[in-house]
């Protein structure tokens, strides 16, 4: 019996190449900066010189307050990091590794968390027992080194932190192609993402008169439930304590792009005053990002040391200052952006004389909605705030 001829199988179609990521103008700019950093290694090797990186110093000694701009900025001091210096070789290679990881993310049009980047880059170096990074704390400062060296936001490197903060009010945004009306987001509001740059978040409509930023989610929920933002035509935000960079950047954009006043309702304690300082002047550790985050025009709306008597609060809601609080108050009092402001000196001196601090929630002892229906409206009407 004749054998059947085997049927020829049609040749498999070649796999289509994945679509190239659509890079923005900012992506191209960041890639150029990353390539320039890498080219420095090749250039040094070609000239038989030890490769090195000059990392801008993020120490207190390299930070100054610019009185004209009214925010903290970084000086010109740098720390040299050399490949052939045994004490610096690992951090040098880690810096280049982070740069390589960010280049990969940008080229693929993808983003990852700080934690994700750590795992993307973590491995055992071939032929050794040495790990590229021992733990997350080993990686985080290197990411900041790359940011400051390239003068790029972390988000421009396609790396983000966890979302921590919400927004509600008369504003509509386009978030990566999805239109979101922040007045229709229910009790939780719109979660402010880590990356809020114009390439990701575009303002479609902003009809508010001002922004009220409160310190904690618990207070924010009271304002949202009482529809304060609707009654007073504002945008209401929080950052769960110290606001993350996404929240600060969002506040900065609303203030500078839409000229909205920013008022801060924070606790009457050294931490609340420090949060205000960071929002207004920028932080010492992230001084290189102040021009894109600091809001010199932000105003401190409360809580104030005089509110204990002004609001007839009970001694039972006071919290005694501890030694760390007292030390911190004295440090804040010497900040150059506070030391020449009599109103702030008076505020801090009164807190020391009182010997106690107050949380915004202390106003609940007056009435559950006292803060939304009486305290803040009165401060706004009287323009009673600290600059």
Image (tube, rainbow, N blue to C red):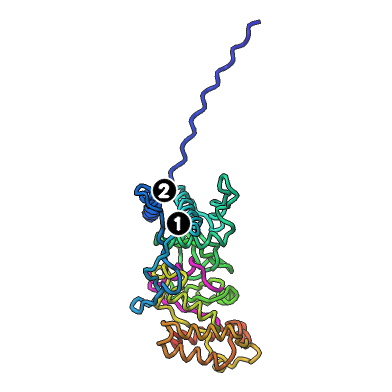
Is residue 313 depicted above or below 107 in this figure? Answer: below
Is residue 350 highlighted in magenta?
A: no
Residue under label 2: 22
Q: Decide: marks 1, 2 in contact (CB < 8 A)? A: no
Above-or-below relation of 326 to 254: below
**Which residues are drawn in magenta?**
241-267
Give the residue number, with chain letter if any, for mark 1: 157
| Label 1 packing within 10 angstroms: few (<14), some (14-19), many (20+) | many
User: Quick check: 178 above or below 336?
Assistant: above
* Apparent side of residue 158 relative to residue 325 in the rendered image (left or right): left
Q: Alpha-carbon distance for marks 1 and 2?
A: 15 Å
Where is the N terminus found, in terms of image quarters? top right
Number of marks present in the image shown: 2
Q: Is residue 303 left or right of residue 78?
A: right
Which x, y percent locates residue 46? Answer: 35, 47
Look at the image and tell me whether residue 262 can be seen: yes
Which quarter of the picture shows residue 269? bottom right
């Amino acid at each position: 019996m004749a054998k059947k001829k085997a049927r020829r199988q049609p040749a498999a179609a070649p796999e289509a190449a994945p679509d190239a990521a659509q890079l923005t103008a900012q992506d191209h700019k960041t890639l150029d900066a990353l390539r320039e950093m890498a080219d420095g290694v090749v250039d040094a090797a070609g000239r038989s010189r030890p490769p090195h990186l000059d990392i801008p110093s993020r120490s207190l000694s390299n930070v100054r307050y610019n009185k004209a701009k009214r925010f903290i900025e970084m000086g010109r001091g740098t720390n040299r990091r050399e490949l052939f210096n045994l004490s610096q070789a690992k951090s040098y290679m880690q810096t280049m590794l982070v740069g390589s990881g960010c280049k990969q993310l940008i080229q693929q049009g993808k983003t990852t968390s700080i934690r994700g980047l750590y795992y993307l880059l973590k491995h055992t170096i071939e032929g050794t027992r040495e790990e590229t990074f021992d733990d997350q704390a080993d990686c985080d400062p290197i990411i900041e080194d790359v940011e400051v060296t390239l003068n790029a936001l972390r988000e421009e490197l396609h790396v983000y932190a966890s979302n921590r903060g919400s927004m509600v009010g008369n504003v509509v945004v386009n978030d990566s192609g999805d239109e979101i009306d922040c007045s229709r987001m229910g009790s939780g509001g719109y979660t402010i993402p880590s990356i809020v740059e114009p390439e990701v978040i575009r303002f479609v409509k902003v009809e508010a008169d001002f922004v009220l930023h409160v310190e904690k989610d618990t207070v924010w929920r009271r304002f949202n439930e009482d529809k304060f933002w609707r009654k007073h035509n504002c945008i209401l935000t929080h950052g769960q304590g110290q606001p993350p960079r996404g929240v600060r950047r969002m506040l900065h954009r609303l203030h500078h792009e839409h000229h909205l006043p920013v008022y801060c309702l924070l606790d009457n304690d050294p931490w609340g005053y420090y949060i205000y300082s960071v929002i207004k002047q920028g932080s010492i550790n992230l001084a290189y990002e102040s021009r894109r985050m600091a809001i010199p025009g932000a105003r401190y709306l409360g809580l104030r040391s005089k509110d204990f008597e002004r609001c007839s609060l009970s001694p039972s809601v006071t919290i005694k200052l501890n030694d760390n609080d007292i030390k911190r108050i004295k440090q804040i009092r010497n900040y150059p952006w506070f030391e020449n402001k009599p109103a702030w000196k008076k505020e801090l001196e009164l807190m020391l004389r009182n010997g106690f601090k107050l949380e915004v929630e202390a106003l609940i002892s007056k009435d559950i909605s006292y803060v939304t229906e009486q305290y803040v409206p009165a401060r706004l009407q009287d323009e009673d705030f600290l600059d």
